[in-house]
Amino acid sequence: TISNTRLPAGEASTSKSLKERRDVDLEIHLQQSKVDFKTKGNMFKKMESLVGVLLLMICFPHSTIQEQDAMSGMETPDREHPLLQSPCKEPTQCCELFGRKYKSGEKLKGVCADIECDNGQWVFTGFFNSKCGQCHIYDDPHFKTFDGYRYDMQGTCSYRVSQTWSEHSLVVGRFKPCNGDASCMDYTIFYDDIHTGIEIDHTMGHDVIVNGESFTVQSNIIGLPIGGHMTQVLAWTAGDCNMFLGSFGLTVKTCPTEIYVWAAPSLYDRLCGLCGTFNGNMNDDFMPCDTVVSYPLNPFPLAFPIDMMIYNQSVSECDPQAINPDNKINTEDPCQLNAVTLARLEEDCVAAFQDIEWPNHDMRTNLLKPATKSCVADLCLMEQNGEPVSALDAWKMQLKEMLERNLQQEVMTVGDENGNYVPGHYGGGKNNIHNQHGCMGPMCNNPAHIKTDFLFEANLGK
């Protein structure tokens, strides 16, 4: 089925309007519900698993949700059955989430950001779980799916960025025109569940809207408040970005010109949207949420995003019912400059990134090449649009900052073969890079301040 969501048509948003949007969306959803984007067989298997969990809860009322899921073959974020909750001996030193109390020193399990309870306060250590999928949408805009496929899509409508098969969680992105023929991130809504909607205007810094109420994200981690009560969504700042850790496995990071989405291992093969399916197979990343048919991979897709549009658009030109996909199967590269000009732009991009220090050759290869390609594409569109040299230079500096932030996140993505956080081991320990500093504490919240001096296997240079 397709989850239906409406982005705000105006600048103002109220709690009532958000509720009205949900009511309208739910009504449309009930009227237009379709088969899940996976096969019917998979859907019935999931239903059987859910029935199994209910039976296990009846038969084993004192077992934890994790134990029941293990018996039924399902995976979920770390939650504990309420019957097993026990108050902490020293309540002031404990943290609470998902209806459970955590002692000081305990960490959240089954999530993508390394969150630890420290004397009653949640702390982000700066590390990310390498077992999670990461999607990245940036600039005007370029996409990297959970499964690693890269493409460009110059749409100026509202799309499903990522949606869980159960429709518990949904990330919606609205794009606006920029750089001539391109588009850029404009507005993001993170629905952790049907009751919790977080609206992020990418031009408003740390000021967001939670169920119609204004809220400023702080450096310390707290549960987002709704009606005087704390939700199950944790929020905190990370430099000039905002971090949101949801309760169903999605973690979202919004920045001025980009958005990251992490998917917990429990969401493996349970996602659809612009970020792909998160199943290790990029060939089905272009599978819409309401069908089992996948569009072929294309660096410049169009028909695929049309099927990824949400039902309720903020502008009439984006109404999916008014677009004929038969006339717009694929788009072409909007960059039309000659080879000589493109070579000059590539030299400019390489020069802009030349003083970045790389921990190893793999990181440099995996990050620098696509960043340079994206940089050339951006500068091409800006030059075609008649932008002054100063604007191109400012954009290159912005791209450099984004690349450095991306590098820091790669450096801080760690884990062992069991998915546990192991400071100093990148990507499951495959590259055996040792972090001399560990980067524990609030310094890690600001990517600009994370230390990256490592013991290199070889001096790779710049």
Image (cartoon, rainbow, N blue to C red):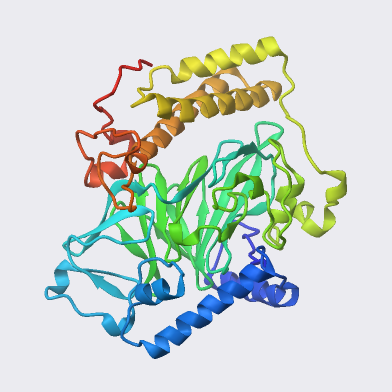
Q: Position of residue 429 (x, y in %)?
A: 32, 40
Q: Can the viewer see residue 68 in this picture?
A: yes
**Camera-nearest residue between 156 and 165:** 165
Q: Position of residue 131 (x, y in %)?
A: 41, 50
The residue drawn where x is 58% and y is 49% is 275
The residue drawn where x is 57% and y is 58% is 271
Q: Quadrant of the N terminus?
A: bottom right
Above or below residue 72? Residue 198 is above
Above or below residue 415? Residue 338 is above
Instruction: Answer left or right for 167 relative to 97.
Output: right
**Camera-nearest residue between 306 and 111:** 111
Q: Can the viewer see residue 20 in this picture?
A: no
Instruction: Answer left or right for 274 relative to 325.
Output: left
Q: Which image quadrant for residue 313?
A: bottom right
Q: Position of residue 229 (x, y in %)?
A: 36, 74
Q: Which image quadrant for residue 110?
A: bottom left
